[in-house]
């Protein structure tokens, strides 16, 4: 957890958060992209900080830009450009808000190193649906794959429904020890009628569809390529029963990766009310799989 208070600086309409040093929470996951030895074998400088961890630097900026409405009916859509390693400094930015009509406001959002290297870029919004979000446009531009081996059993349109999901409160509280921007509602359930899940934790709730949706083996190393988290009637709470629906949006490839895009929707288990939506793109590294040897 950062010991320095959050302070945003605005210049030429751009809000800049403080420089933070995110922790690689998963560095002990041997055989993953977050493990130094595995990552270096695959050509990275070291174990990478997961993209959902970087999401946690944005909420104070988005609340400053859009107000409290962002928590209930807003989103953040980021495409990851360059991986960072444990403790490397990064800074989050949000541009001026633009009126998109129908009550929706949108702003550019991005993250950089102090040297100006882009870690991620995309859009944020509040007030309703944004069909022009950064990742909605990326999905529409995805070219079909011609040779999938890791993802050979998957196809666009595959879907699952009613996958149970529940975030454990004590586990979420332990995660807060490394959160760069620890908002009060992550600890105090009295503020919103429950313990609010930090973005990285809320994203985990929506990922419950991955195993039943893709049915992949273990012979690969993957990494997040893009994440969009949208609140339909947020926030997301810990210690609450949810159901998740998911479907494959697109499948693609590059010289070094196979690419899987999916969308999932988190619903209240008791009444089916939609709470949040996720668009996720994962890159499955060909060099990590015997199927590409």
Image: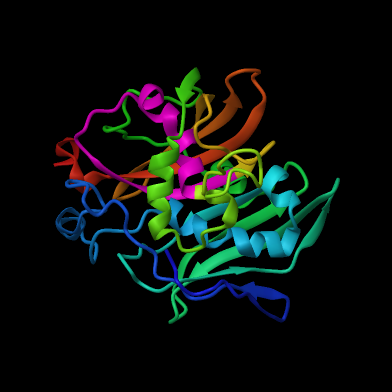
Q: Where does residue 168 sit, x and y in percent of width and height?
A: 42, 35
Foreground of the two, 252 or 182: 182
The quarter of the picture where the C terminus appears is top left
Assess whether residue 226 is covered by the magenta stretch: yes
Q: Where does residue 130 sit, x and y in percent of width and height?
A: 71, 45
| Number of numbered discs overlaid on the protein picture | 0
In the picture shown, does residue 122 fall above or below 174? below
Answer yes or no: is residue 164 visible: yes
Answer yes or no: is residue 160 visible: no
Q: Where does residue 91 sit, x and y in percent of width and height?
A: 50, 72
- The picture quadrant where one finds residue 230 is top right
Q: Could you tell me which residue is drawn at 73 percent across and 57 percent down?
A: 106
In the picture shown, does residue 114 fall above or below 211? below
**Residue interval drawn in magenta:** 200-229
Is 291 placed left or right of 230 in the picture? left
The quarter of the picture where the N terminus appears is bottom left
Q: Could you tell me which residue is drawn at 27 percent across and 33 percent down?
A: 150
Assess whether residue 100 is covered by the magenta stretch: no
In the picture shown, does residue 274 fall above or below 14? above
Foreground of the two, 85 or 80: 85
Q: Could you tell me which residue is drawn at 40 percent across and 36 percent down?
A: 145
Colour convention: rainbow
Q: Where does residue 144 sit, x and y in percent of width and height?
A: 45, 36
Is 26 placed left or right of 266 in the picture? left
In the picture as drawn, the residue positioned furthest to the right comes out as: 102
């Amino acid at each position: 957890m950062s010991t320095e208070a959050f302070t945003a600086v605005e210049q030429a309409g751009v809000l800049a958060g403080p420089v933070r040093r995110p922790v690689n929470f998963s560095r002990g996951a041997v055989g993953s992209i977050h493990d130094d030895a595995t990552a270096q074998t695959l050509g990275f400088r070291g174990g990478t900080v997961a993209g959902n961890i970087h999401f946690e630097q944005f909420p104070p900026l988005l609340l400053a830009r859009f107000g409290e409405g962002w928590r209930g009916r807003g989103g953040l859509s980021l495409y990851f450009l360059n991986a960072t390693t444990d403790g490397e400094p990064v800074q989050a930015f949000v541009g001026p808000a633009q009126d998109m009509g129908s009550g929706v406001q949108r702003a550019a959002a991005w993250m950089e190193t102090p040297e100006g290297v882009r870690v991620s870029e995309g859009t944020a919004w509040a007030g309703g649906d944004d069909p022009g979000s950064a990742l909605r446009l990326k999905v529409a531009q995805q070219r079909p794959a011609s040779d999938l081996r890791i993802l050979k059993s998957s196809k666009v349109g595959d879907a699952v429904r009613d996958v149970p999901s529940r975030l454990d409160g004590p586990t979420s509280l332990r995660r807060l020890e490394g959160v760069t921007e620890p908002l009060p509602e992550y600890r105090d359930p009295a503020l919103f009628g429950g313990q609010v899940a930090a973005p990285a934790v809320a994203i985990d709730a929506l990922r419950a569809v991955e195993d039943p949706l893709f049915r992949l083996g273990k012979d690969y190393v993957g990494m997040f390529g893009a994440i969009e988290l949208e609140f339909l009637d947020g926030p997301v709470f810990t210690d609450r029963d949810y159901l998740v629906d998911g479907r494959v949006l697109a499948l693609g490839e590059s010289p070094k990766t196979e690419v899987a895009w999916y969308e999932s929707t988190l619903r209240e288990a008791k009444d089916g009310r939609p709470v949040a939506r996720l668009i996720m793109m994962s890159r499955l590294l060909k060099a990590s799989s015997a199927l590409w040897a």
